[in-house]
Amino acid sequence: MKKIFMLAAALVAMETAQAQSELSNASTTGRGGVQNTFVRDYQAIGVNPANLGFGAPTVSFTFLEGGLNVSSQAFTRTIIKDFSKIEDERTLAMEDRLRYAKAFTSDNVLNAGVDMNTFAIAVYLPKVGGFGFSNRQRILGHAGFNKNFSELLFLGQEAPVVQQTNEDERVYVHELFDGTELKASWVNEWNLSYGRKLVSLPAVAIYAGVGYRYLQGLALYELSAKDGEVKAYSASSPVLDFDYERYLDDPQFRYGGANNQLSPVGKGHGYDVGLSAEIAKTVKVSLSVTDMGSMRWSKNLLQGQDKGFYLSDIISAEEYDFEDVADVAQQIIDTALAFTPVNELKTDLPTRFRAGVGAKLGNKVEVGVDYVHALNNAPGNLSQDFFGLGVDVMPTSFFRFSTGVSTGAGEKLNLPIGIAFIAQSYEFGISTRDITAPLTENNPGASFAFAFLRFKIGNQESL
Protein backbone atom coordinates (compact mmCIF):
# COMPACT_ATOMS: atom_id res chain seq x y z
CA MET A 1 0.00 0.00 0.00
CA LYS A 2 1.21 3.53 -0.68
CA LYS A 3 2.81 5.44 2.17
CA ILE A 4 0.73 8.53 1.48
CA PHE A 5 -2.44 6.50 1.96
CA MET A 6 -1.16 5.00 5.19
CA LEU A 7 -0.37 8.48 6.48
CA ALA A 8 -3.87 9.63 5.64
CA ALA A 9 -5.46 6.53 7.14
CA ALA A 10 -3.34 6.31 10.27
CA LEU A 11 -2.97 9.96 11.24
CA VAL A 12 -5.78 11.93 9.59
CA ALA A 13 -8.53 9.36 9.12
CA MET A 14 -11.50 8.82 11.34
CA GLU A 15 -14.44 6.64 11.99
CA THR A 16 -17.48 8.81 11.73
CA ALA A 17 -18.59 8.30 15.28
CA GLN A 18 -17.81 11.95 15.86
CA ALA A 19 -19.00 13.12 12.49
CA GLN A 20 -22.31 14.91 12.44
CA SER A 21 -23.96 16.21 9.29
CA GLU A 22 -24.13 19.70 10.81
CA LEU A 23 -20.63 20.46 9.53
CA SER A 24 -22.23 21.22 6.17
CA ASN A 25 -24.54 23.70 7.94
CA ALA A 26 -22.80 26.66 9.57
CA SER A 27 -25.76 27.74 11.72
CA THR A 28 -26.33 24.20 13.07
CA THR A 29 -22.65 23.86 13.98
CA GLY A 30 -23.06 27.05 16.02
CA ARG A 31 -25.67 25.22 18.10
CA GLY A 32 -23.41 22.22 18.68
CA GLY A 33 -25.33 20.00 16.25
CA VAL A 34 -28.85 20.84 17.44
CA GLN A 35 -30.95 21.10 14.28
CA ASN A 36 -34.04 18.89 14.17
CA THR A 37 -36.57 21.71 14.69
CA PHE A 38 -34.43 24.56 13.39
CA VAL A 39 -33.57 23.46 9.85
CA ARG A 40 -35.73 24.24 6.84
CA ASP A 41 -35.11 24.72 3.10
CA TYR A 42 -32.08 22.74 1.83
CA GLN A 43 -30.64 22.49 5.37
CA ALA A 44 -33.38 19.93 6.15
CA ILE A 45 -31.83 17.46 3.68
CA GLY A 46 -30.48 14.47 5.59
CA VAL A 47 -32.02 15.69 8.87
CA ASN A 48 -35.81 15.77 8.43
CA PRO A 49 -37.26 16.22 4.92
CA ALA A 50 -40.66 17.12 6.39
CA ASN A 51 -39.24 20.53 7.35
CA LEU A 52 -39.06 21.43 3.65
CA GLY A 53 -42.82 21.94 3.89
CA PHE A 54 -42.50 24.78 6.40
CA GLY A 55 -42.46 27.36 3.63
CA ALA A 56 -40.36 30.53 3.63
CA PRO A 57 -38.16 31.36 1.85
CA THR A 58 -39.46 30.67 -1.65
CA VAL A 59 -36.01 29.85 -3.02
CA SER A 60 -32.76 29.36 -1.13
CA PHE A 61 -29.41 28.15 -2.40
CA THR A 62 -25.77 27.97 -1.39
CA PHE A 63 -22.32 27.27 -2.82
CA LEU A 64 -19.41 25.71 -0.94
CA GLU A 65 -21.05 25.73 2.49
CA GLY A 66 -19.39 23.32 4.89
CA GLY A 67 -16.84 22.72 7.57
CA LEU A 68 -14.17 20.53 9.09
CA ASN A 69 -13.54 18.91 12.46
CA VAL A 70 -10.53 17.40 14.24
CA SER A 71 -10.56 15.82 17.69
CA SER A 72 -8.38 13.46 19.69
CA GLN A 73 -8.28 11.69 23.03
CA ALA A 74 -4.58 10.87 22.59
CA PHE A 75 -3.13 14.28 21.80
CA THR A 76 -2.56 17.01 24.37
CA ARG A 77 -1.59 20.63 23.78
CA THR A 78 1.88 19.74 25.10
CA ILE A 79 2.28 16.95 22.56
CA ILE A 80 1.13 19.24 19.73
CA LYS A 81 3.75 21.79 20.77
CA ASP A 82 6.35 19.01 20.93
CA PHE A 83 5.44 17.96 17.40
CA SER A 84 6.15 21.40 15.96
CA LYS A 85 9.42 21.60 17.91
CA ILE A 86 10.59 18.11 16.98
CA GLU A 87 9.58 18.62 13.35
CA ASP A 88 12.36 21.21 13.16
CA GLU A 89 14.84 19.03 15.04
CA ARG A 90 13.85 16.01 12.92
CA THR A 91 15.09 13.30 15.35
CA LEU A 92 12.88 11.85 18.07
CA ALA A 93 14.65 11.14 21.35
CA MET A 94 13.88 7.82 23.04
CA GLU A 95 12.22 9.70 25.90
CA ASP A 96 9.78 11.27 23.44
CA ARG A 97 9.21 7.99 21.64
CA LEU A 98 8.26 6.28 24.90
CA ARG A 99 5.91 9.12 25.82
CA TYR A 100 4.18 9.08 22.43
CA ALA A 101 3.85 5.28 22.45
CA LYS A 102 1.98 5.55 25.75
CA ALA A 103 -0.14 8.54 24.70
CA PHE A 104 -1.16 7.00 21.36
CA THR A 105 -2.44 3.83 22.99
CA SER A 106 -6.03 5.00 22.67
CA ASP A 107 -9.35 4.05 21.09
CA ASN A 108 -9.50 7.58 19.65
CA VAL A 109 -6.06 8.64 18.51
CA LEU A 110 -7.54 11.00 15.97
CA ASN A 111 -10.96 11.76 14.50
CA ALA A 112 -11.26 14.23 11.63
CA GLY A 113 -13.54 15.03 8.75
CA VAL A 114 -14.68 17.38 6.04
CA ASP A 115 -18.35 17.88 5.12
CA MET A 116 -19.10 20.21 2.22
CA ASN A 117 -22.19 21.19 0.25
CA THR A 118 -20.73 22.06 -3.12
CA PHE A 119 -24.20 23.21 -4.16
CA ALA A 120 -27.66 23.05 -2.59
CA ILE A 121 -31.04 24.54 -3.47
CA ALA A 122 -34.57 24.42 -2.12
CA VAL A 123 -37.80 25.64 -3.73
CA TYR A 124 -41.13 26.01 -1.95
CA LEU A 125 -44.43 25.99 -3.87
CA PRO A 126 -47.39 26.81 -1.58
CA LYS A 127 -49.83 24.28 -3.07
CA VAL A 128 -47.25 21.57 -3.73
CA GLY A 129 -44.65 21.61 -0.96
CA GLY A 130 -40.91 22.04 -0.71
CA PHE A 131 -38.19 20.40 -2.81
CA GLY A 132 -34.52 20.24 -1.91
CA PHE A 133 -31.50 19.17 -3.93
CA SER A 134 -27.82 19.10 -2.96
CA ASN A 135 -24.42 17.70 -3.80
CA ARG A 136 -22.28 16.96 -0.77
CA GLN A 137 -18.69 15.79 -0.37
CA ARG A 138 -18.07 13.87 2.84
CA ILE A 139 -14.61 12.71 3.93
CA LEU A 140 -14.57 10.77 7.19
CA GLY A 141 -12.29 8.48 9.18
CA HIS A 142 -10.86 7.28 12.49
CA ALA A 143 -7.61 6.03 14.01
CA GLY A 144 -7.34 4.02 17.22
CA PHE A 145 -4.24 2.04 18.30
CA ASN A 146 -3.84 -0.72 20.84
CA LYS A 147 -0.68 -0.90 22.99
CA ASN A 148 1.29 -3.20 20.67
CA PHE A 149 0.52 -1.19 17.53
CA SER A 150 1.40 2.13 19.16
CA GLU A 151 4.64 0.82 20.64
CA LEU A 152 5.71 -0.70 17.32
CA LEU A 153 5.06 2.63 15.56
CA PHE A 154 7.20 4.70 17.89
CA LEU A 155 9.70 2.19 19.28
CA GLY A 156 10.24 -0.15 16.35
CA GLN A 157 12.53 -3.02 17.34
CA GLU A 158 12.75 -1.55 20.85
CA ALA A 159 9.05 -2.27 21.46
CA PRO A 160 8.40 -4.65 24.39
CA VAL A 161 6.34 -7.00 22.20
CA VAL A 162 9.39 -7.51 19.95
CA GLN A 163 11.63 -8.23 22.93
CA GLN A 164 9.11 -10.74 24.30
CA THR A 165 8.65 -12.64 21.01
CA ASN A 166 11.03 -15.19 19.51
CA GLU A 167 12.48 -14.26 16.12
CA ASP A 168 11.02 -17.39 14.51
CA GLU A 169 7.58 -16.99 16.11
CA ARG A 170 4.83 -16.12 13.67
CA VAL A 171 2.35 -13.54 15.02
CA TYR A 172 -1.09 -12.55 13.75
CA VAL A 173 -2.96 -9.28 13.46
CA HIS A 174 -6.10 -10.54 15.22
CA GLU A 175 -4.04 -11.38 18.31
CA LEU A 176 -1.31 -8.76 18.32
CA PHE A 177 -3.37 -5.69 17.37
CA ASP A 178 -6.77 -6.44 18.91
CA GLY A 179 -8.55 -3.10 19.41
CA THR A 180 -6.72 -1.29 16.59
CA GLU A 181 -8.80 0.52 13.96
CA LEU A 182 -7.86 2.55 10.89
CA LYS A 183 -10.81 3.71 8.82
CA ALA A 184 -11.34 6.32 6.12
CA SER A 185 -13.90 7.05 3.40
CA TRP A 186 -14.77 9.65 0.80
CA VAL A 187 -18.34 9.71 -0.55
CA ASN A 188 -19.98 11.98 -3.12
CA GLU A 189 -23.70 12.41 -2.30
CA TRP A 190 -26.54 13.51 -4.59
CA ASN A 191 -29.58 14.31 -2.47
CA LEU A 192 -33.21 14.89 -3.39
CA SER A 193 -35.87 15.55 -0.73
CA TYR A 194 -39.53 16.57 -0.60
CA GLY A 195 -41.78 17.74 2.22
CA ARG A 196 -45.26 19.16 2.50
CA LYS A 197 -48.06 19.95 4.94
CA LEU A 198 -50.43 17.00 5.48
CA VAL A 199 -52.78 18.33 8.16
CA SER A 200 -53.79 21.92 8.82
CA LEU A 201 -55.93 22.63 11.89
CA PRO A 202 -56.36 25.91 13.79
CA ALA A 203 -53.84 24.90 16.46
CA VAL A 204 -51.81 22.13 14.81
CA ALA A 205 -50.08 21.61 11.46
CA ILE A 206 -48.45 18.29 10.57
CA TYR A 207 -45.79 17.87 7.88
CA ALA A 208 -44.29 14.77 6.25
CA GLY A 209 -41.32 14.28 3.99
CA VAL A 210 -39.11 11.76 2.22
CA GLY A 211 -35.55 11.92 0.97
CA TYR A 212 -33.40 9.94 -1.44
CA ARG A 213 -29.66 10.04 -1.98
CA TYR A 214 -27.49 8.48 -4.66
CA LEU A 215 -24.03 7.74 -3.30
CA GLN A 216 -20.75 7.49 -5.19
CA GLY A 217 -17.84 6.10 -3.19
CA LEU A 218 -14.47 7.59 -4.14
CA ALA A 219 -12.36 5.95 -1.44
CA LEU A 220 -12.66 3.33 1.29
CA TYR A 221 -10.08 2.04 3.72
CA GLU A 222 -10.49 -0.19 6.73
CA LEU A 223 -8.15 -2.12 8.97
CA SER A 224 -9.75 -3.26 12.19
CA ALA A 225 -8.93 -6.03 14.63
CA LYS A 226 -11.66 -6.68 17.17
CA ASP A 227 -12.65 -9.75 19.18
CA GLY A 228 -10.50 -12.07 17.10
CA GLU A 229 -11.81 -10.81 13.75
CA VAL A 230 -9.81 -8.83 11.20
CA LYS A 231 -11.40 -6.62 8.53
CA ALA A 232 -9.09 -5.11 5.93
CA TYR A 233 -10.32 -3.47 2.71
CA SER A 234 -9.06 -0.85 0.31
CA ALA A 235 -10.68 0.80 -2.72
CA SER A 236 -9.64 4.05 -4.35
CA SER A 237 -10.71 6.26 -7.25
CA PRO A 238 -7.94 7.15 -9.75
CA VAL A 239 -7.81 10.69 -8.35
CA LEU A 240 -5.82 9.30 -5.40
CA ASP A 241 -3.24 7.86 -7.79
CA PHE A 242 -2.88 4.31 -6.49
CA ASP A 243 -0.85 1.89 -8.55
CA TYR A 244 -3.03 -1.14 -9.32
CA GLU A 245 -0.85 -2.47 -12.15
CA ARG A 246 0.10 -5.68 -10.34
CA TYR A 247 -3.60 -6.66 -10.09
CA LEU A 248 -4.74 -5.89 -13.66
CA ASP A 249 -4.23 -9.45 -14.89
CA ASP A 250 -6.16 -10.98 -12.00
CA PRO A 251 -9.68 -12.03 -13.17
CA GLN A 252 -11.06 -11.15 -9.73
CA PHE A 253 -9.94 -7.53 -10.04
CA ARG A 254 -12.45 -5.05 -11.46
CA TYR A 255 -10.50 -2.01 -12.55
CA GLY A 256 -12.44 1.23 -12.67
CA GLY A 257 -11.81 4.75 -13.80
CA ALA A 258 -8.97 4.55 -16.29
CA ASN A 259 -10.35 7.56 -18.19
CA ASN A 260 -12.00 9.44 -15.31
CA GLN A 261 -10.06 10.64 -12.29
CA LEU A 262 -13.23 10.89 -10.18
CA SER A 263 -14.70 7.59 -11.30
CA PRO A 264 -16.52 6.01 -8.30
CA VAL A 265 -15.37 2.67 -6.91
CA GLY A 266 -18.60 2.16 -4.97
CA LYS A 267 -22.27 3.06 -5.38
CA GLY A 268 -25.29 3.05 -3.12
CA HIS A 269 -28.71 4.38 -2.24
CA GLY A 270 -30.01 6.01 0.93
CA TYR A 271 -33.44 7.02 2.18
CA ASP A 272 -34.85 9.39 4.81
CA VAL A 273 -38.37 9.75 6.22
CA GLY A 274 -39.65 12.38 8.60
CA LEU A 275 -42.61 13.92 10.39
CA SER A 276 -42.87 17.36 11.95
CA ALA A 277 -45.59 19.20 13.79
CA GLU A 278 -46.14 22.86 14.56
CA ILE A 279 -48.35 23.62 17.55
CA ALA A 280 -49.93 27.06 17.98
CA LYS A 281 -47.32 28.41 15.57
CA THR A 282 -44.88 28.37 18.48
CA VAL A 283 -43.82 24.82 19.38
CA LYS A 284 -42.27 22.37 16.90
CA VAL A 285 -41.82 18.62 17.22
CA SER A 286 -39.60 16.65 14.83
CA LEU A 287 -39.15 12.88 14.27
CA SER A 288 -37.12 11.27 11.49
CA VAL A 289 -35.11 8.22 10.46
CA THR A 290 -32.18 8.97 8.17
CA ASP A 291 -29.58 7.07 6.15
CA MET A 292 -31.46 3.86 5.56
CA GLY A 293 -29.77 1.87 2.82
CA SER A 294 -26.37 0.51 1.84
CA MET A 295 -23.38 0.87 -0.48
CA ARG A 296 -21.67 -1.70 -2.69
CA TRP A 297 -17.96 -1.28 -3.35
CA SER A 298 -16.97 -3.21 -6.46
CA LYS A 299 -14.06 -1.55 -8.30
CA ASN A 300 -10.37 -1.35 -7.40
CA LEU A 301 -11.34 -3.37 -4.34
CA LEU A 302 -8.71 -5.27 -2.36
CA GLN A 303 -9.15 -7.40 0.75
CA GLY A 304 -6.38 -8.07 3.26
CA GLN A 305 -5.89 -11.52 4.78
CA ASP A 306 -4.34 -12.04 8.21
CA LYS A 307 -1.52 -14.29 6.98
CA GLY A 308 0.78 -13.82 9.98
CA PHE A 309 4.25 -12.29 10.02
CA TYR A 310 7.53 -12.09 11.93
CA LEU A 311 8.20 -9.05 14.10
CA SER A 312 11.87 -9.29 13.20
CA ASP A 313 10.89 -8.33 9.63
CA ILE A 314 9.87 -4.85 10.81
CA ILE A 315 12.89 -2.64 10.21
CA SER A 316 13.31 0.56 12.22
CA ALA A 317 15.97 3.24 12.04
CA GLU A 318 18.48 3.88 14.79
CA GLU A 319 17.72 7.61 14.68
CA TYR A 320 13.95 7.96 14.66
CA ASP A 321 11.84 10.74 13.13
CA PHE A 322 8.23 11.12 12.00
CA GLU A 323 8.97 9.71 8.56
CA ASP A 324 10.25 6.57 10.26
CA VAL A 325 6.95 6.29 12.16
CA ALA A 326 5.13 6.37 8.81
CA ASP A 327 7.55 3.82 7.37
CA VAL A 328 6.88 1.44 10.25
CA ALA A 329 3.11 1.86 9.81
CA GLN A 330 3.42 0.97 6.13
CA GLN A 331 5.69 -2.00 6.92
CA ILE A 332 3.22 -3.38 9.45
CA ILE A 333 0.36 -3.29 6.95
CA ASP A 334 2.38 -4.63 4.01
CA THR A 335 4.03 -7.37 6.09
CA ALA A 336 1.10 -8.48 8.23
CA LEU A 337 -1.61 -8.56 5.54
CA ALA A 338 -1.78 -10.09 2.08
CA PHE A 339 -4.06 -7.98 -0.17
CA THR A 340 -5.91 -9.73 -3.00
CA PRO A 341 -8.72 -8.56 -5.34
CA VAL A 342 -12.35 -9.26 -4.45
CA ASN A 343 -15.51 -8.62 -6.45
CA GLU A 344 -17.72 -6.81 -3.97
CA LEU A 345 -18.12 -5.44 -0.46
CA LYS A 346 -21.43 -4.27 0.98
CA THR A 347 -21.54 -1.68 3.77
CA ASP A 348 -24.71 -0.47 5.49
CA LEU A 349 -25.35 3.24 5.90
CA PRO A 350 -25.29 4.66 9.46
CA THR A 351 -29.05 4.66 10.10
CA ARG A 352 -30.16 7.06 12.84
CA PHE A 353 -33.31 8.03 14.70
CA ARG A 354 -33.63 11.79 15.30
CA ALA A 355 -36.03 13.62 17.57
CA GLY A 356 -36.37 17.24 18.57
CA VAL A 357 -38.61 19.71 20.36
CA GLY A 358 -38.31 23.45 19.87
CA ALA A 359 -40.11 26.68 20.59
CA LYS A 360 -40.09 30.33 19.61
CA LEU A 361 -39.84 32.72 22.55
CA GLY A 362 -41.19 35.87 21.00
CA ASN A 363 -39.80 37.16 17.72
CA LYS A 364 -36.13 37.16 18.65
CA VAL A 365 -35.35 33.82 20.33
CA GLU A 366 -35.76 30.19 19.28
CA VAL A 367 -34.69 27.21 21.40
CA GLY A 368 -34.54 23.49 20.65
CA VAL A 369 -33.59 20.17 22.24
CA ASP A 370 -32.24 17.29 20.12
CA TYR A 371 -31.75 13.57 20.60
CA VAL A 372 -30.06 11.24 18.07
CA HIS A 373 -29.78 7.45 18.45
CA ALA A 374 -27.91 4.96 16.24
CA LEU A 375 -30.13 2.21 14.80
CA ASN A 376 -27.27 -0.01 13.61
CA ASN A 377 -23.53 -0.56 14.04
CA ALA A 378 -22.62 0.47 10.51
CA PRO A 379 -19.31 2.25 9.89
CA GLY A 380 -19.76 5.92 10.63
CA ASN A 381 -22.59 5.61 13.10
CA LEU A 382 -22.69 7.14 16.56
CA SER A 383 -20.85 5.34 19.33
CA GLN A 384 -23.14 6.99 21.92
CA ASP A 385 -26.47 8.81 21.86
CA PHE A 386 -26.32 12.53 21.11
CA PHE A 387 -28.05 15.13 23.30
CA GLY A 388 -28.08 18.86 22.72
CA LEU A 389 -29.70 22.17 23.60
CA GLY A 390 -29.49 24.93 21.00
CA VAL A 391 -30.45 28.61 20.99
CA ASP A 392 -30.78 31.19 18.21
CA VAL A 393 -31.02 34.86 19.19
CA MET A 394 -31.69 37.73 16.77
CA PRO A 395 -31.20 41.02 18.62
CA THR A 396 -31.58 42.81 15.28
CA SER A 397 -33.00 41.84 11.90
CA PHE A 398 -29.52 41.55 10.37
CA PHE A 399 -27.60 39.64 13.08
CA ARG A 400 -28.10 36.16 14.56
CA PHE A 401 -26.17 34.65 17.46
CA SER A 402 -26.24 30.89 18.04
CA THR A 403 -25.03 28.88 21.00
CA GLY A 404 -26.00 25.92 23.18
CA VAL A 405 -24.54 22.85 24.80
CA SER A 406 -24.21 19.29 23.49
CA THR A 407 -22.69 15.98 24.49
CA GLY A 408 -22.63 12.32 23.54
CA ALA A 409 -21.68 10.81 20.16
CA GLY A 410 -18.30 9.95 21.68
CA GLU A 411 -17.47 13.55 22.54
CA LYS A 412 -17.10 15.60 25.71
CA LEU A 413 -19.36 18.51 26.63
CA ASN A 414 -19.34 21.04 23.78
CA LEU A 415 -19.93 24.79 24.06
CA PRO A 416 -20.66 26.02 20.52
CA ILE A 417 -20.82 29.55 19.11
CA GLY A 418 -22.01 30.83 15.75
CA ILE A 419 -22.72 34.21 14.22
CA ALA A 420 -24.54 35.17 11.05
CA PHE A 421 -25.04 38.48 9.24
CA ILE A 422 -28.30 38.60 7.31
CA ALA A 423 -29.24 40.94 4.48
CA GLN A 424 -32.46 40.88 2.45
CA SER A 425 -31.34 38.07 0.16
CA TYR A 426 -27.87 37.14 1.43
CA GLU A 427 -26.53 35.47 4.57
CA PHE A 428 -22.96 35.07 5.81
CA GLY A 429 -22.11 32.89 8.80
CA ILE A 430 -19.25 31.24 10.66
CA SER A 431 -19.32 28.92 13.67
CA THR A 432 -17.49 26.37 15.80
CA ARG A 433 -18.87 23.28 17.51
CA ASP A 434 -16.86 23.91 20.69
CA ILE A 435 -15.18 27.21 21.54
CA THR A 436 -13.15 25.57 24.34
CA ALA A 437 -11.70 22.67 22.28
CA PRO A 438 -8.51 24.42 21.03
CA LEU A 439 -7.75 25.71 24.55
CA THR A 440 -7.95 22.50 26.59
CA GLU A 441 -4.82 20.61 27.63
CA ASN A 442 -6.41 17.18 27.28
CA ASN A 443 -8.55 16.00 24.35
CA PRO A 444 -7.94 19.10 22.22
CA GLY A 445 -9.76 19.64 18.96
CA ALA A 446 -10.99 22.19 16.50
CA SER A 447 -14.04 22.65 14.31
CA PHE A 448 -15.00 25.37 11.89
CA ALA A 449 -18.02 25.77 9.64
CA PHE A 450 -18.74 28.56 7.17
CA ALA A 451 -21.44 29.82 4.82
CA PHE A 452 -20.05 32.55 2.61
CA LEU A 453 -22.47 32.20 -0.31
CA ARG A 454 -25.96 31.54 1.11
CA PHE A 455 -28.83 33.24 -0.68
CA LYS A 456 -32.59 33.53 -0.03
CA ILE A 457 -35.29 34.79 -2.34
CA GLY A 458 -38.92 35.41 -1.47
CA ASN A 459 -40.95 35.66 1.73
CA GLN A 460 -38.87 35.11 4.89
CA GLU A 461 -39.62 34.85 8.59
CA SER A 462 -37.54 36.43 11.33
CA LEU A 463 -36.20 33.10 12.63
Image (cartoon, rainbow, N blue to C red):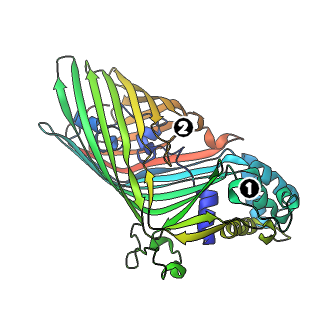
- Residue at (47% x, 47% y) in the render: 449
Asked if residue 38 lies left or right of residue 431, the reply is left
Residue 176 bears which disc, if any? Answer: 1
- Residue at (53% x, 74% y) in the render: 242
Outermost residue toward the left? 127
Asked if residue 143 lies left or right of residue 117, the reply is right
Query: First in sequence: mark 1 or mark 2?
Result: 1
Q: Secondary structure at mark 2?
A: loop
Q: Is residue 170 above or below residue 401?
A: below
Indicate the position of residue 34 as horizontal and vertical percent values: 44, 33
Res 331 quadrant in image = bottom right
- Amino acid under label 2? Ala
Q: Residues within 10 Å of mark 2 (few under 14, many from 20)?
A: many
- Amino acid under label 1? Leu
The residues tagged by marks 1 and 2 sit, at their Cα atoms, a distance apart of 28 Å
Mark 1 or 2, which is nearer the eye? 1
* Of residues 297 and 364, the one drawn nearer to the viewer in this rendering: 297
Residue hosting label 2: 409
* Of residues 28 and 461, the one drawn nearer to the viewer in this rendering: 28
* Of residues 214 and 26, the one drawn nearer to the viewer in this rendering: 214
Quadrant containing the C terminus in the rendered view: top left
Tell me if residue 366 can be seen: no
Res 399 quadrant in image = top left
Q: Residues within 10 Å of mark 1 (few under 14, many from 20)?
A: some
Residue 317 bears which disc, if any? Answer: none
Asked if residue 193 lies left or right of residue 136, the reply is left
Indicate the position of residue 430 as horizontal and vertical percent values: 46, 45
Q: Secondary structure at mark 1?
A: helix
Tell me if residue 274 can be seen: yes
Indicate the position of residue 435 as horizontal and vertical percent values: 57, 38
Indicate the position of residue 266 as horizontal and vertical percent values: 41, 62
* Of residues 428 and 215, the one drawn nearer to the viewer in this rendering: 215
